[in-house]
Every structure is written in structure tokens, then in C-alpha cells.
Image (cartoon, rainbow, N blue to C red):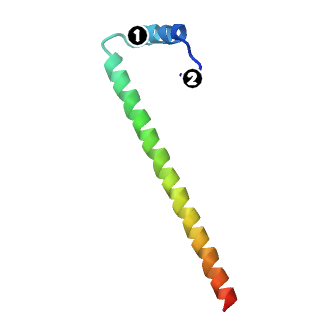
Amino acid sequence: MFGLGTQELLIILVLVMIVFGAGKLPQVGGALGKGLRNFKKGMGEAGEEIEEAQVEEIEKKEEKDEKKED
């Protein structure tokens, strides 16, 4: 996972618990989860917009080609 071993993950977990405390850890995890979910959703929407733009561009080129043939 991201090139991190078990020892590195444990060190990071300990540091997070020191900084935020055990009581805030569920809130931090929830916020992190929501952030990742929104990021994935945004990336998916951006991909769809790119695909739509490519389709529109292809359709415009086809229309120009048809007009040239007439």
C-alpha cells in the first residue's frame, strides 16, 4: 500500500493518535472517508465530461466532412 510497510503504518497511526487523540479518531476517519468519496466522485464526473466533449468533437468533424462531400 503506497510502498509503506507495517512499521511505517504503525508509526503514522501512533502520531495521528497523539495529535488528534483517541476520541477524535473516528471523526477524523469519517472526514477522510468522505473526502476520498467526494474525490472519486469528482474524478468520475470529470471523466464523463471529457468523454462527452470528445464525442461532440467527433460529431462536429463528421458534420463538416458531410458538408464538404455535398
Compared to residue 69, the image places residue 22 above or below, namely above
- Which of the 4 image quarters holds residue 63? bottom right
On residue 17, which mark appears?
Answer: 1
Local SS, label 2? loop
Q: In the drawing, does residue 2 fall left or right of residue 41? A: right
Determine whether 31 is above or below 17 in the image.
below
What x and y, as percent, mark residue 26? Answer: 32, 19
Q: Position of residue 65 (x, y in %)?
A: 67, 81
Which kind of residue does numbered mark 1 sit on? Answer: Met
**Quadrant that contains the C terminus:** bottom right
Pick out the residue farthest to the right.
68
Amino acid type, residue under disc 2 in the picture: Phe
At 53% from the left and 7% from the top, the residue drawn is 7
Near mark 1 (Cα within 10 A), the count class, few <14, some 14-19 or many ≥20, is some
Label 2, label 1: how far apart the Cα atoms are: 21 Å
Foreground of the two, 20 or 68: 68
The residue where tag 2 is placed is: 2
In depth, the one of 15 and 54 nearer the eye is 54
